[in-house]
Image: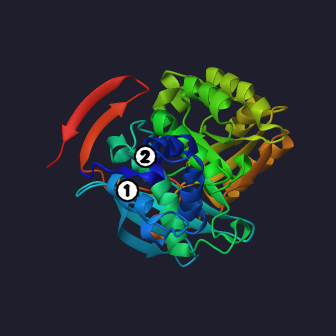
Amino acid sequence: MDARTNLLGLPQAAMSTLFEGLGERPFRARQVMQWIYRRGVSDFEQMTDLGKGLRSRLAEVAFVAPPEVGLHQGSSDGTRKWLLRMDTVQGIETVYIPEPRRKTLCISSQVGCALDCSFCSTAQQGFNRNLSTAEIIGQVWLAHAELGFGESIAERPISNVVFMGMGEPMANYRNLVPALSILLDDYGFCLSKRRVTVSTSGLVPMIDRLREDMPVALAISLHAPDDALRDQLVPINRRHPIAELLDACWRYAPALGDRDITFEYVMLDGVNDSPAQARDLARLLRDRPAKINLIPFNPFPGTRYQRSPLERIEAFREVLVQGGVMATVRRTRGDDIDAACGQLAGRVNDRTKVRLGDKMISVTVQP
């Protein structure tokens, strides 16, 4: 293990502390952050406004390195996916989705996922560990390095970052918040809170904490209009049922100003896609700061679910709209390289399977 500190894991305050420990003024942290995040420089020797002595000391105690790329795939629709090595056997996936009005990077927060949502490929892989802040931010830095940092912030290839890859971000809260700080920092990636989204399956206490600590855009993986069905699809619902989850959302909403909370709803054929279920969903969210993103289910090997027919998805959306709720249908991107929503699997060979919803814990270790 490298005893040095990966600077990709340090928000500005922690970076300043590191330089103070080296006997340097705190402004050095801002200088180095500009080299790393504005210019994409990882070699201290290229940071020419630092003295030679400081560059040498930095090389002794720190480094700048994203995760190693194990596989890079490109989709016919322009989507790109990287399988990133976390060690010799574990891997995560990061996806870049270019669209006319935005260019989104979907990043992971854990190796695998412990929430066991029945329709998600990541959940079926099991859970290994949380990612460090450096591993989270390393995905964003790597994507910029691959796509180009751009001459200015406005010309960068990534306009939005969403925590919708592998893992439950709120279950890795300790590393999530420092990562958000770097994404938003003027000397980091300089993104607005509107352009950074955290998606959660419903860890209510962490929603309340995020409201106080870093109120970025919020997306809720809802997927059912009633507790009986959501208990099956999203087991965390057994701990935090829909009414409790929605109360947390409405507490969060004032921190967003004029923005709505997004509710994600994967469309499963014959499971959650009836007109009656659409009416129930509309009753839950009507007259609230909410919008619904209907997601055509993306199949993966071994799943028992099928995608709802397009005409049924459109009919479901129409019921929501008529019921007074804004609703859109997500365009499927990257499914030819298994990069679409719910398909990210990575490589999770050492698994700790934890079902948070029903508090069952079992451990399986694979060689």
Give the image location of residue 336, x and y in percent: 48, 71
Q: Residue at x 67, y 30 (%)?
A: 211
Q: Residues within 10 Å of mark 1 (few under 14, many from 20)?
A: few
The residue most toward the left is 367
Give the structural element (helix, strand or loop) at label 2. loop
Tag 2: amino acid: Leu
Residue under the point 72% across and 32% down: 280
Looking at the picture, does residue 240 appear above or below residue 15?
above
Report the coloring of the rendering. rainbow
Q: Is residue 70 visible?
A: yes
Report the number of numbered marks.
Answer: 2
Using the image as rendered, state which of residue 109 and residue 352 is in the foreground. Answer: 109
> Disc 1, disc 2: CB below 8 Å?
yes
Q: Which tag, 1 or 2, sits closer to the chain's start?
A: 2
| Label 2 crowd bin: few (<14), some (14–19), many (20+), radius 10 Å | few
Q: Amino acid at mark 1?
A: Arg
Q: Which residue is mark 1?
A: 57
36 sits left or right of 318 in the view: left
Q: CA distance from mark 1 to mark 2?
A: 8 Å
Q: Which residue is mark 2?
A: 22
Given the current orientation, which residue lies at the most extreme bottom position?
A: 76
Percent from the top left, x then y, of residue 326? Answer: 81, 45
Q: Nearer the viewer, residue 41 or 131?
A: 41
On screen, residue 80 above or below 182: below
Q: Is residue 364 above or below residue 98?
A: above
Q: Front-most of 230 and 356?
A: 356
Q: Which SS class for mark 1?
A: helix
Which residue appears at 66% of the width and 27% of the height? 212
Q: Residue at x 41, y 49 (%)?
A: 122
Q: Is residue 327 left or right of residue 356?
A: right
